[in-house]
Image (cartoon, helix red, strand yellow):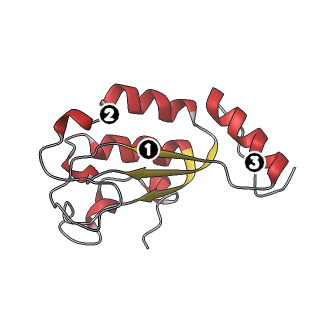
Amino acid sequence: MDQKHVNVPVGRIAIILNALRDIYSQTSFGFFYLTNECNYSCKMCYMDSRPGMMDTRIGLELSLELMQELKGIDEIILSGGELTLLAHHEKQLRAACSAARLVAVYTNGTGFINKTEISKFLTKSERGAWREI
């Protein structure tokens, strides 16, 4: 096994995805589309996200359960619409950082006061998984 893949998978889904990763020499990742709601209604949006789509949200409990099943995976991508509209986006980000070696957040950024805002609520170990682009 490649030395960069020393994580011991804990979650059932991670075991499957990491096995496929090892077979195909790829990265194992989970993509969480947390909501279709957005604070903008951009014509070029590939997700067709817009304001008022509250019924498209994945609940906190379900998202945390799924992330637990992905524990040990290489990467988790959190996306939406605009996930910072969710009252519990910080808990979802923490869970993703605990489950994966790398976490990417697709956001328009308007939910954060400044670039350092997102790292304020992460612990030192969680910040290890977070990379700002």
- Image coordinates for residue 82, horizontal then vertical, percent: 25, 54
Q: Is residue 84 left or right of residue 4?
A: left
Identify the element where label 3 is drawn.
helix
Tell me the CA gap for discs 1 and 2: 9 Å
Which quadrant would residue 87 be assigned to in this image?
Answer: top left
Q: Quickly name the residue at label 3.
A: 21
Are discs 1 and 2 less than 8 Å apart at CB?
yes
N-terminal of the pair, mark 1 or mark 2, is 1
- Other residues around mark 3 within 10 Å, as few (<14) / some (14–19) / many (≥20): some
Q: Quickly name the residue at label 2.
A: 58
Q: Is residue 83 left or right of residue 7?
A: left
N-terminal of the pair, mark 2 or mark 3, is 3
Kind of residue indicated by mark 1: Phe
- Residue at 63% in and 41% down: 72
Say which mark, if any, is on residue 32.
1
Say which mark, if any, is on residue 9.
none
Where, quadrant-wise, is the C terminus in this rendering?
bottom left
Residue sitting at the far right = 1
- Other residues around mark 2 within 10 Å, as few (<14) / some (14–19) / many (≥20): some
In this view, the residue in front, 109 or 43, is 43
Q: Is residue 63 left or right of residue 18?
A: left
- Residue at 87% in and 49% down: 1
What is the tally of numbered marks visible in this picture? 3
In this view, the residue in front, 14 or 123, is 14
- Residue at 54% in and 42% down: 99
Identify the element where label 2 is drawn.
loop
Q: Is residue 11 visible?
A: no
